[in-house]
Image (cartoon, rainbow, N blue to C red):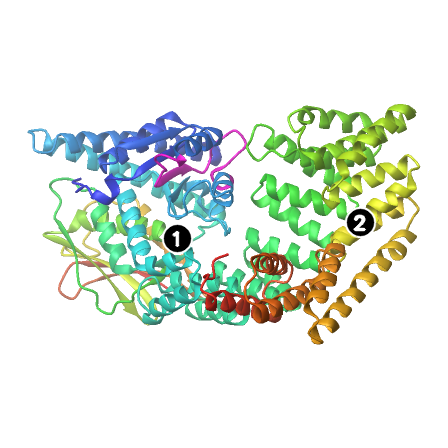
Amino acid sequence: MKDALIAAVVHDLKNALASLTTSTGDIARRSAGTELEFDTSKLHATTMALSQRLIAFLTLYRSGQAGLGAQLRDNTPEDFLREVVAGLVLPPEAVSIRTAASEDSTPFWYFDDYLTRMALEAAVHNALRYARSEVVLACGMRNGFLVFSVADDGPGLGADGAPSTGLGTALCEAIAQAHTNGERVGKVVLRNRREGGALFELWLP
Amino acid sequence: MAIIQNSRISKLKALLIDDMSSMRVNLRTQLQQLGVGDVAQAASAAEALKAIGARAATKPFDLVLCDYNLGGGTNGQQLLEYVRAKKLLQPVTIWFMVTAESSYDSVAVASDYAPDDYLIKPFTAANLEGRLLRHFERQDALEPALKRMAGGDLEGALTELSRIAGSGAKFTMDALRLKARCLTELHRHDEAKGVFAQALSIRQRLPWAELGFARALRDAGEMEKAHAAAVAMVAVNPTLVGAHELMAEIHQARGEDAQAVEALRKAESIVPSAERARALGEMAVRCGDLELAKTAYAKVVTATRASVTKTPYDNAALAQIYMDTGDAAKALEVLKPVQREYGGERGFQAIAAAVEARAHQEAGDEAAAGAALTRALEFAKHAEPGAALAVSRACFALGEDEAGERLVTDAVCSDHEDLQLVAAARRLLKDAGREDVISRAVDAQVQNMLAMTEKALALAKKAQLTEAQTIIAEAVAGLPKNVGVLVAAAQINLLVLSQQGLDLEVVTRVREYLGTLDALARGTERVVKMQAYFKELLRKAGTGGGT
């Protein structure tokens, strides 16, 4: 099958799934407080996650075709992070997610909020697979980069149980590289935390 | 997904514009989740304009969610540009552009009419809410400045904006952008340049700041540098419409018409719009590239046929191009559909009758040609220079050289410093083999009026103000758009006001002179000084500075 046809099919699926996700969201909202609450919110989180994975795939596909163009504008990192967390749709059994106070914040920074949100959502979903009790998001300035981080308290890197397609990592790499400022280019750093668990960092110049 | 309804959001009166009904249903559901009850829908640009018009007086929209791809030949950006340029919505109305992720890159072109935000499909109600809250926060932070700007108090706005930008906090960049806009409006181009440079020192390669800096260079008269800046910008970002348009303006100002056409052609291909096609058509006519002009104007006529932007002057321009390329039948055909509708539009009727006269003449029907020319001459009285030139061309074609000559002379003298008008007159006279006319008749009239201006100024110096006023008024009538004449006229009348007190008739006259000067020589030091002096006189007299 030709690449263009594959992309067209995925695009079509994505639209259908987006519509479905609005419906499941509506159902979840309307069944809040009823005996269906658990199941409908799980249903909604599942369709949402599928929809996001498909968009991630399409975005990555596009980055291979023409490169990802980042639309940079000034965002307030802490507000942005709060918005990302507020917008997450998680299954009812998910561990808690919180934002940590910033180490060294900046009132505004230039980045593509759409792409950055997509990267952080992928990182959060990955962290949720391993986290024991919580996932922590934070942001701060380091070496002239704005750094977003997603930390979990799971077994850490290299102790992999669940299989992964690598889609999330490839997407985050592409998004980081779409961010440039002069000579400097964004990057992704993955490492283990001293206190245990894995740490994902997105560095934006 | 628990969304706490925000009362500011739930009060919004919203308009959804999307050609796909399933998308409208989707958007409507999301707005309902945010508590928005007043949701109107439109499936096309035409429907949207209808809805905006119908609600303007009673319940104007606060929020527009517009899909970029609307089908039917108009996209969301074109609709936004049209709506904003015509001020069909209040400036505070929020416009969010909805785009598919695959077209995101191409959609976000730098334009003077940018949407307030982009929403990339698919998005959730929570995403939309986040965008709205962010918009409100920015609006609230900037409100003291925006209010002053809306009220014309640019100095006050600058103080507010410096405060916000000086804090280095959130919205610093918005404040800098608005600051530069105020400074540009005040013709303080060097200071505006400084603000754009400040923004670029915070973040390099910001399209709005780079474009603003280049425009400020142009406005400050540094054409070479402005051009170099625009060239550098499109080298990095070829889809920057504003940079192409700036290049076109610079080329045009330098008389490099062919390059201006090329730049306009690029701008038009990036974000096609009737306005851009029209600008391209005009420029192509000026260059004598009639084939390109024909294509451009045909596009305009087709694109605006069923739209509120329709004007018969596009048909008139296209008809003249057909006539000039030897296609009389097509020329008449393109006039037909608008001739009855715009019966009262004298300028257009003058051109239409002139085209008819030439068509009949070519077909050998001299009687009909003569009758049409008589009508054209009647309509051409008090018509715009463009219409006068069209009729003059018909006069020469029918051998009525004397009438043609008079029309050209009057048209050119109405604004002999308008290089484009003079060039159009020259082209016309060259085609008619009468190039001598401009230098003979026009130069004589210009010299005469300038001499009168000198005389009026000399009289004013000798305190003979009444005589000076009479003579300068005559000079203004003869050369209504000459900067030198207008400056002298404003000076003399300001002197009258300061010495003899406020006379309503003189105040009105000064206001007219300064208004014309503002359009002709914006920001010139002497014009700015006279405007300030006039304001001061009015203030002292207690009539306020309102215009």
- The count of marks equals 2
Identify the residue under disc 2.
Answer: B410
Per the rendering, the mark at residue B365 is none
Residue A201 appears in the figure: no
Contact (Cβ within 8 Å) of mark 2 with mark 1: no
Quarter residue B222 falls in = bottom right
Disc 1 sits on a residue from what chain?
A: A
- Say what amino acid the circle numbered 2 marks: Asp
Task: Point out the stretch of residues depicted in magenta.
Answer: B56-78
Q: Local crowd at mark 1 within 10 Å, few (<14), some, or many (≥20)?
A: many
Q: Is A18 left or right of B413, judged from the image as shown?
A: left
Between circles 2 and 1, the one closer to the viewer is 2
The residue under the point 48% across, 32% down is B45
Q: Classify mark 1: helix, strand or loop.
A: helix
> Is A132 situated above or below A44?
below
Which of the image's four quarters has the N terminus of chain B? top left
Q: Is-magenta flag for residue B67?
A: yes
For disc 1, the marked residue is A174
What whole-number distance in Å separates the C-alpha atoms at marks 2 and 1? 65 Å
Query: As drawn, is B484 to the left or to the right of B187?
Result: right
Q: Main secondary structure of the magenta part?
A: loop
